[in-house]
Image (cartoon, rainbow, N blue to C red):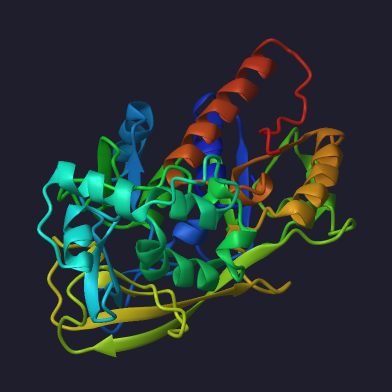
Amino acid sequence: MVGAGLSGAVIGRHLAEVGHNITIIEARDHLGGNCHTARDEKTGILLHVYGPHIFHTDDAEVWNYVNRFETFLPYKNQVKTTSRDVNGKRGVFSLPVNLHTINQFFGKTLRPDEAKDFILREQADTGIEVPRTFEEQALRFVGRDLYEAFFKGYTKKQWGLHPSELPASILKRLPVRFNYDDNYFFHRFQGMPKNGYSAMIEAILDHPMITVHLGTEFTQGMSGGFDHVFYSGPLDGYFDYQLGRLGYRTLDFERFDYDGDYQGCAVMNFGEEDIPYTRITEHKHFAPWEEHKSSVCYREFSRLAEPDDTPYYPIRQVKEKELLRDYVNLARSTNGVTFVGRLGTYRYLDMDVTIREALDTARGFEARVNDREEVPPFFVETL
């Protein structure tokens, strides 16, 4: 298993339980990949080291799986954003856009049906029949005022591109609620691991058939001593970037400490383009069952990833998709290797989807081995 994140841990545990000897190598000095959590030595606050990770899913099997290894406590993600209302007055608003957001932003007291009618008749650009870009998608469903306050500036900072250059699919179904529900997610199961994600992954890997080596870089020459390799590192990195590098956005974090409660919520977005950071996260609020007098916060900045940066979000524009197609062809012709996870398949994946695919991958591998079939290079369709 190359990588001690969710993919490597879940696949490794399943195969260990059916009798395989598993070796996991991880380039970093910790478990968990980008969902790594650690206690701050100064404050005792549980930090999401690579940015917030909130678990949410409708997949009951995945929910039961994570609760097998860690206690998940209820957590509702209630995101706030600082921006300007329709009159230019700065304020704090709830996301996703809901009835409270609409009434506060426009200075109205609309009921749900009135708000729907107001957005449709006075705000939404109904002349856009089939939105092709992120900007058209937002204009079609919420109109220019809400788009410019909550989506335009934030998106430009997050992706480094104007929303008119991004596909409509990024916005997907624009979350607009004509009630006062400010829960960012709508899944049945939502929560946070009481002791953090790294503790959960450590428990998953606690099996006599699993050996973990941290601080160990993978090279293709290591593959010879193993029956199969599951690779969750960067897809282009496996092939030594021989066709070029796939594009990613990365994040920079600027820490600051505060004596007290800095912003009263875990996540505060900043929609205005002239504020360089996308959001501030206050990590003690990710564990509301704990009490901490002081606070640890991070300003979050997004930029194009350089070769030595930690990759976060695959860009997947036209140029990247063409290069991805070439790497997919290479991957499919590579025997003895299964490419898995966010980096191995060059997709943005929520944690529950990562675990679901890892379970399915492990079961598929087990079935082929039991049937004495040759194991092809399993590769999730990415194009």
Residue 259 lies left or right of residue 58; in this view the side is left
Q: Is residue 69 above or below residue 99?
A: above
Residue 59: percent from left, percent from top: 36, 30
Residue located 30% across and 77% down the image: 84
Residue located 33% across and 32% down the image: 58
Looking at the figure, which quarter contains the N terminus? top right
Total count of labels: 0
Residue 348 lies left or right of residue 183; in this view the side is right
In the foreground, 375 or 275: 275
Residue 206: percent from left, percent from top: 43, 44
In the foreground, 43 or 212: 43
Q: Is residue 120 above or below residue 53?
A: above
Looking at the figure, which quarter contains the C terminus? top right
In the foreground, 146 or 184: 146
Residue 262: percent from left, percent from top: 21, 82
Residue 231 lies left or right of residue 60; in this view the side is right
Residue 206 appears in the figure: no
Q: Is residue 301 above or below residue 211?
A: below
Residue located 55% across and 38% down the image: 12
Residue 96: percent from left, percent from top: 30, 55
Residue 32 lies left or right of residue 220; in this view the side is left
Residue located 45% across and 80% down the image: 277
**Furthest residue in direction top, as rendered:** 371
Q: Residue 340 occupies which quadrant of the picture?
A: top right
Residue 108 appears in the figure: yes
